[in-house]
Amino acid sequence: MTFSVILVLLYGLISSRFVASQEPSIAFPDNLQIEGIPSIPKAIAEQVRKYTESRAAVAFDWHPTKRQMLIGTRFGNSSQVHEIKAPGAARTQLTFFEEPVAFASYDPKDAKFFVFSKDVGGNEFSQLFRYNFSDGAVSLLTDGGRSQNGGLVWNRQKTAAAYASTQRNKVDRDIWVIEPASSNSNANRLVVENSGGGWSVTDWSSDGKSLILMEYLSINRSNLYLADVATGVKKPITNLDEEVSYSSATFSEDGSHLWITTDKGSEFQQFASLRLSDGEIVPISQSIPWDIEGIAVAPNGKTIVLVANEAGSSVLYKYDVATKSLKRIDNIPSGVVALGQWRSDSSEIAFTLNSYNSTSDVYSWEVADGITSRWTESELGGVLASDLQEPTKISWKSFDGTQITGFYFKPKATFTGARPVIINIHGGPEGQSRPLFQGRNNYFLNELGVAIIYPNVRGSAGFGKSYLKMDNGLKRFDSVKDIGALIDWIGTQANLDVNRIMVTGGSYGGYMTLATAVEYNDKIRCSLDVVGISHFGTFLKNTESYRRDLRRVEYGDERLPEMIEFFDRIAPLNQSHKIKKPLFVVQGGNDPRVPMSEAEQMVAQVKSNGSPIWYMMAKDEGHGFRKKSNADLQFYATVQFVKDFLINQ
């Protein structure tokens, strides 16, 4: 080869690198703090666009007299309140805030207004507001400060609503009653003082004089009370000394008993009746060996709809109060259901459904003829439903012989050979991975050929209360070992590449991600932690005070010497020197659950160790990114991270 030819080749190589370096890159706005993340080509935004443009819809409330409803959906940067007047009809946007609206409820008398809630920057200090249909005016109904307000339940007289709030001292969740239509100074008043952050209202008595209150202590323990609205005195309905969980409670039509869900005497949450005169509980859904995760009692008290979590998918049942018959509702699309409200005439119930090939949409079911109607058909952003594959349920044995299960989303069939794997761990820790729409993650499946596995490690919901308790206290690290066993299982699968594994998760799943990055550094390529816990001791010290005692029940009390030592021993922060593979940390600056300090201390420590680390913090987000603009930028960076460290290395 002549010298001149070599010069030409070198010039071409240098020129190509210069051109590549000049490729337009994505500009990160000032609301994002970026560290360690390299320039990301603008081309990525175009490559992934159709995977970032899907929408979703959720059912909020029925109009009190018409067959129309309020829903939540996004047409701009965040989800807002819309009104829809018939199944498949056009949606009319009513609110236009920068912040998402989480909930909306019509004035149940004549729909002159609706009440809604929103926070600021994801801080979860939700305030209640009134929107007037007559002029579009919005009025603040609560204190507007650092308090949480929510869980609105209207009385049967349709004049007032009860809700839970931390207004009094920012710690304890009391019960307040509000008359949203009134401007009187007494229209919002404290009626029951409580101690603790786990209180909520579940129903009013028919005469409006009493409330059912639920005190949530942990996923395994809760109590029910009857409270007098006039005096604020509450008395327990259930045995306060029992470790029993109650998750629903509604008055029967005659007020003699409650319709409840409980795990008393069972591994699973069962639908049952509780007689108020003596507390006797009579199970009704014994024939369903799964959790009943929701019930909705019709206003006339004659029909109750149940949703069962059967191996991750939802199955609906109808209970006829008069005949005491429980029958499956068969014409509901397959997916995961969240029950909504009944129409005021008890003829129809709304619900939201999500599935692997359809984002969340609003449906309704009519009692008389059993017809299911689809009210919204949210766009998939250019993705074809036919290109999306139903996940496979998988199982593997962990270190102690415990059978662990999960959902395996396979990449598009056009990809051959052993595929890279993303292990995505749910939060909670009492959450559950389910066969849901993958949204942006469909890009990894369809365009990059990456398999995604969602494990339900010990401590996950949906598999009985004994399984829920298997990671409590000093057993916390056993769930991390479940991921180690999954990695070993991946190694036995010919179509999965055990040498190309990335681990990710959010919140508690973020802790699991960091712990896996420490414990199994040599077995993974990289990890992505989203709003994760880096040390349970510092997390419990800094999480918002209204949450602290509730989290201590699950994780352990950081004030006890035994737990101090244990938290120090299992903290990813204290073993960060073991992380040699690339780590990406994502955090919201206003996160009240897992405070920003958890991310900052982990990033600083890993950085000081000289390990590669990316960091993205959004100043206007909380426990995860809710604004589309921020979520898109997070995804662009994630795609680059996956390409650089999972696929190309």
Image: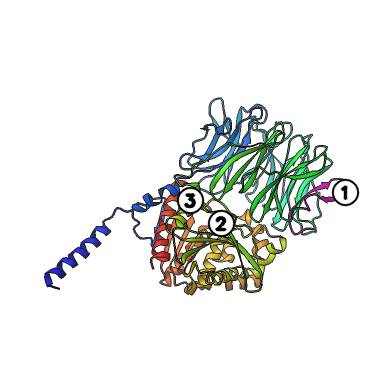
Q: Name the residue under label 1.
A: 278
Examine the structure image and report whether residue 485 is included in the region drawn in magenta. no
SS class, disc 3: helix
Q: Mark 2 points at which residue?
A: 391
SS class, disc 1: loop
N-terminal of the pair, mark 2 or mark 1, is 1
Is 354 left, or right, of 234 in this rendering? left
Front disc: 2 or 1: 2
Q: Which quarter of the figure has residue 145?
A: top right
Please state which amino acid type lies under the numbered disc 3.
Asp
Q: Position of residue 280 (x, y in %)?
A: 85, 50
> In which quadrant of the rendered image does the N terminus lie?
bottom left
Q: Residue furthest top?
A: 134
SS class, disc 2: loop
Residue 532, disc: none
Q: Do the residues labelled 3 and 1 touch (CB within 8 Å)?
A: no
Q: Mark 3 points at which residue?
A: 387
Viewer-closest of 355 and 428: 355
Q: Where is residue 92 in the image (x, y as percent from the top left)?
A: 52, 32
Please state which amino acid type lies under the numbered disc 2.
Pro
Cα distance between the residues tagged 2 and 1:
47 Å
Is 378 left, or right, of 282 in this rendering? left
Magenta stretch, residue numbers: 266-286
